[in-house]
């Protein structure tokens, strides 16, 4: 679609289009919902889905118009990376709502708030992925987080959910505080809130190193909290387990894309000059995450908790791709590493959607399929969906021909291509730790295929959930057989993000 | 679409179709579908041998298309004298496996057949891949169907065996992945195996690469001391699973040595040849002795497989034409013989439901036709001249004599150990008076079992009596590989 004439006429409105449209539609949904009496909320549901589809399409069409647009006094940036992540975040929100609708309906969670809060959290994500200013990053983060805190707490009479909400809120607020503190130091040292200006100021080499180092530490700690990397991971298992599965997916899916986006915006676009400092921290964070995440996941019997630890390990692997950006003062492998991380995080979200989709698929009225044992004998109850779940598990374990393998391959390749022995050994450590991970993913396959079913209830999900889960599984498999296209998109997005 | 693509994707496609539409209510249709698919897949591979150009060591029947452009990965297939027999062997064994499961597998028939057909396609893919990453993808993907086959249709300790199989193999191959990526970087962004063969590498790098590959392939072969997964996997796997494991999957490791380790790191291969020879001899002698004391027939054959594969690696690392060709011939013949041995055990197990040697005795009285086959395969297993088992071992021993007499002498003891454990088992199981009521009630082979063992018996005898076609096809490739190995790749 040729947007050039529009762009020249109104750069602001076009760069902001996905966000403004979503804001308007979210308000419409909130108002319309007041007039919907139907307990199934059919109208609200389809209106939300349509709004999200519009946002996804808008982001998709804008993916790359050949140049990067800055809008609102350079507060907002519209570049391929932002559009790509925005599009996938909107798609993830759509998929989440499809999986969540029957689940939420059985648990009296299907209220207007579910839809509006989901849309506002997506709005926060869109703001984050297109932020070009420290304060805008922070605004987007808070918008997303506040919506998610409320979503977690929606089940008021459930102690687990309330506890999860408290933990999430307190630790999330602490993390935001860290981030804000770090950003304020960066502002103090460089005199600018704009990411591009900070980058330039750091390039002069005239800035007080002590303040910068301290600021970097706080920024990285804040980001690590949001990503859920060890040692800032404590909230992840409890929140994943305590939240209703639908909400777990809302905070385990799209927000990861946003956390990745602000990591790139802040650390790479803003603070590449300090890469030597933050890369070291990321190496420690990622190795610790892979070690603890994989080890702790082995001991879990609750599948949501297991997936929480698995997420920690996956985030650790993803962070590895951010480590080899600047080696011995040159940035040759930067694009390679960052684009492999981008590919990793997108495919990880795709797989996470599917696994939590399966958990909700097996849950039914009055029964939460939270335990690994709930998957017992699934291959007999439904060979097809056992196969779909097996694909997700093998993908998370990184076994070809699923997409998880190529994600790991891309990250490892970016490490090895530096030809620095430290990084090559890091790659060896990463593969050894991912071997630990294979065990607990295989265990899920084991209970599905090798054990006899204990639960004889028929699977009662409707056609839309069944179709989407199948498509989700097919996507993980097909992207595994033909990963080239998405990899190329990720590379294009990162190249443009680095060029600005 | 080329022949190799057909050989890979035909069984995979058929397997996926069976998985999707097969039901246990129509088990017969599923079985016939699987048989037809496996037969067609086998027929497709025949032109690979008839149309094979023996005069060149280059890859033949090549197909090349870009696959992942960002990493310059190509869907590049080809076979040469080293690999072509394994494509046929895989397709052949799959037909046998389908026949062997006919009446035995009654539950989830479509999943069983589907898993084997998919596995067959993936295994063919491993032998045909000329691109490093493509090889790795096929190599790893084979774990998934095998894991399910052992775990779903296996014996009482199947879960333990399935996990051990999967994690052992994965552990080895992950290091290989790092090695592949390093080679990709070193070669300036290419996953082409033939480019890697020409890549100069320093001694230090070669050693590291050699050991990275070593872990992947040694687990798969398996070599002592990383062999412990094999007896477990064999014992617990259903008959078909054991057959494919022994006949083909073990060959992936040995094949990896001649496709990757040796040509990519020739200097390191020469340097560490003593190490490989030592491990091979331990496999031949020590594992041979271990086999002698087994009570369980499947375990006995599993250990005998390890000992036989020790011969293969020994043949490779003495760097002579006889040894190398002998090793490859041994791989093919072991494919037939070990597969047949496991099928024989399967035939007994289906009737008596025991694999203990002590549960049998005097089987030849009640099952004369079967006993004839079983004794033939047992003779092949201990390397009797005129059977397939003899050719490879003989060539390797001859090659080893030229290399070092004492190594050859030690290796030749396998003829004693092999005869010892195999014949002793034959004596206890088949000969003597009828031991118990179970044996008395045994019924002899039905026509299906007769056909499947008959096919293998023909293969074993043909290969033993007239091995020339086998060695002829691999001759040029083996000579070229040895020439390549004799040239140092150290940068000058």
Image: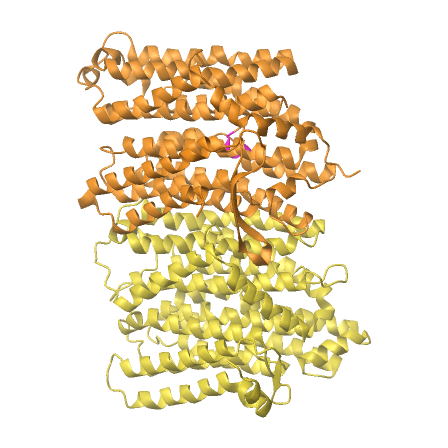
- Image coords of residue A367 (percent x, y): 27, 63
- Magenta stretch secondary structure, dominant: helix
Q: Colour of chain A?
A: yellow
The chain drawn orange is chain what? Answer: B
- Image coords of residue A187 (percent x, y): 70, 81
Examine the rendered structure and indicate whether residue A166 appears above or below residue B56.
below
Looking at the rendered image, the quarter that the C terminus of chain B falls into is top right
**Residue B166 seen anywhere in this rendered image of the structure:** no
Front-most of residues B397 and A287: B397
Which image quadrant is residue A304 in? bottom left
- Specify the segment rendered in magenta: B218-222
**Residue B214 seen anywhere in this rendered image of the structure:** yes
The residue at 24%/86% (across/down) is: A37
Total labels: the figure holds: 0
**Left or right: where does residue A352 sit relative to residue B199?**
left
Residue B265 among magenta residues = no
**Left or right: where does residue A392 sit relative to residue B351?**
right
- Image coords of residue A197 (percent x, y): 72, 81
């Amino acid at each position: 679609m040729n947007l050039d004439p529009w762009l020249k006429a109104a750069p602001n409105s076009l760069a902001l289009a996905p966000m403004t449209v979503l804001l308007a539609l979210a308000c419409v949904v909130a108002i319309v919902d007041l007039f919907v009496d139907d307990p199934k909320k059919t109208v609200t549901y389809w209106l939300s889905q349509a709004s999200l589809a519009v946002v996804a399409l808008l982001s998709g069409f804008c993916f790359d118009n050949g140049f990067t647009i800055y809008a609102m006094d350079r507060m907002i940036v519209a570049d391929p990376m932002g559009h790509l992540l925005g599009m996938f975040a909107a798609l993830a929100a759509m998929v989440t709502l499809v999986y969540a609708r029957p689940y939420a309906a059985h648990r009296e969670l299907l209220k207007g708030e579910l839809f509006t809060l989901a849309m506002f959290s997506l709005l926060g994500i869109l703001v984050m992925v297109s932020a070009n200013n420290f304060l805008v990053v922070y605004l987007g983060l808070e918008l997303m987080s506040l919506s998610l805190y409320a979503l977690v707490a929606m089940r008021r009479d459930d102690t687990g959910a309330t506890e999860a909400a408290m933990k999430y809120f307190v630790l999330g607020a602490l993390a935001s505080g860290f981030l804000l503190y770090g950003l304020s130091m960066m502002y103090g040292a460089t005199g600018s809130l704009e990411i591009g200006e900070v980058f330039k100021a750091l390039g002069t080499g005239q800035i007080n190193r002590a303040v910068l180092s301290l600021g970097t530490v706080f920024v990285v700690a804040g980001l690590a909290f949001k990503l859920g990397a060890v040692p800032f991971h404590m909230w992840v298992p409890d929140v994943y387990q305590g939240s209703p599965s639908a909400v777990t997916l809302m905070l385990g899916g799209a927000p990861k894309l946003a956390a990745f986006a602000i990591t790139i915006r802040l650390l790479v676009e803003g603070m590449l000059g300090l890469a030597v400092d933050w890369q070291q921290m990321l190496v420690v964070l990622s190795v610790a995450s892979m070690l603890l995440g994989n080890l702790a996941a082995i001991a879990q019997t609750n599948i949501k908790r297991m997936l929480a630890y698995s997420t920690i390990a996956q985030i650790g692997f993803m962070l590895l791709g951010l480590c080899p950006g600047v080696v011995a003062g040159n940035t040759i492998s930067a694009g390679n590493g960052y684009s492999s991380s981008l590919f990793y995080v997108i495919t990880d979200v795709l797989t996470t959607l599917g696994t939590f989709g399966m958990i909700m698929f097996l849950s039914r009225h009055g029964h939460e399929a939270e335990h690994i044992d709930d998957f017992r004998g699934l291959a007999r109850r439904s060979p097809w969906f056992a196969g779909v779940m097996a694909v997700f598990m093998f993908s998370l374990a990184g076994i070809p021909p699923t997409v998880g393998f190529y994600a790991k391959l891309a990250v490892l390749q970016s490490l090895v291509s530096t030809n620095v022995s430290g990084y090559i050994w890091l790659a060896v450590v990463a593969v050894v730790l991912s071997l630990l991970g294979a065990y607990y993913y295989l265990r899920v396959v084991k209970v599905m295929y090798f054990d006899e079913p204990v639960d004889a209830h028929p699977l009662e999900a409707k056609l839309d959930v069944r179709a989407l889960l199948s498509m989700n599984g097919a996507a993980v498999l097909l992207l595994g057989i033909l990963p080239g296209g998405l990899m190329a998109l990720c590379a294009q997005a990162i190249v443009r993000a680095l060029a600005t | 679409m080329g022949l190799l693509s057909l050989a890979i994707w035909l069984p995979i496609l058929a397997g996926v179709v069976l998985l999707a539409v097969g039901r246990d209510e129509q088990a017969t249709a599923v079985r016939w579908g699987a048989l037809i698919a496996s037969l067609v897949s086998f027929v497709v591979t025949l032109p690979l041998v008839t149309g094979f150009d023996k005069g060149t060591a280059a890859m033949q029947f090549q197909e090349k298309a870009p696959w992942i452009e960002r990493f310059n990965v190509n869907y590049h297939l080809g076979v040469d004298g080293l690999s072509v027999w394994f494509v046929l062997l895989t397709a052949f064994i799959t037909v046998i496996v389908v026949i062997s499961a006919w009446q035995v597998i009654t539950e989830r028939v479509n999943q069983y057949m589907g898993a084997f057909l998919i596995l067959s396609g993936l295994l063919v893919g491993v032998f045909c891949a000329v691109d490093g990453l493509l090889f790795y993808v096929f190599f790893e993907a084979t774990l998934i169907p095998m894991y399910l086959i052992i775990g779903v249709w296996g014996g009482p300790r199947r879960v333990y065996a399935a996990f051990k199989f999967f994690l052992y193999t994965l552990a080895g191959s992950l290091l290989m992945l790092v090695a592949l990526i390093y080679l990709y970087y070193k070669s300036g962004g290419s996953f082409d195996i033939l480019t890697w063969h020409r890549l100069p590498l320093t001694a230090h790098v070669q050693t590291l690469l050699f050991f990275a590959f070593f872990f992947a392939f040694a687990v798969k072969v398996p070599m002592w001391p990383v062999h412990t997964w094999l007896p477990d996997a064999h014992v617990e796997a259903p008959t078909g699973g054991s057959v494919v494991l022994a006949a083909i999957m073990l060959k992936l490791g040995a094949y990896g040595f001649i496709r990757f380790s040796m040509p990519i790191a020739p200097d390191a291969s020469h340097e560490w040849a003593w190490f490989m020879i030592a491990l091979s001899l331990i496999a031949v002698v020590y594992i041979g002795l271990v086999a002698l004391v087994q009570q369980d027939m499947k375990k006995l054959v599993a250990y005998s497989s390890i000992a036989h594969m020790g011969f293969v690696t020994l043949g490779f690392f003495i760097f002579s034409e006889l040894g190398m060709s002998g090793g490859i011939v041994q791989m093919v013949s072991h494919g037939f013989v070990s597969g047949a041995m496991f099928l024989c055990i399967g035939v007994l197990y289906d009737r008596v439901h025991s694999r203990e040697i002590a549960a049998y005795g005097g089987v030849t009285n009640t099952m004369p036709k079967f006993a004839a086959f079983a004794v033939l395969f047992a003779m092949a297993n201990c390397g009797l001249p005129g059977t397939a088992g003899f050719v490879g071992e003989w060539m390797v021993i001859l090659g080893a004599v030229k290399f070092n007499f004492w190594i050859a002498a030690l290796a030749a003891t396998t003829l004693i150990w092999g005869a010892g454990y195999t014949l002793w088992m034959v004596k206890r199981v088949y000969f003597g008076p009828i031991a118990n009521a179970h044996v008395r009630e045994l019924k002899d082979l039905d026509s299906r079992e007769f056909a499947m063992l008959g096919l293998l018996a023909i293969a074993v005898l043909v290969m033993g009596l007239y091995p020339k076609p086998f060695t002829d096809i691999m001759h040029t490739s083996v000579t070229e590989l040895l020439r390549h190995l004799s040239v140092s790749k150290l940068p000058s």
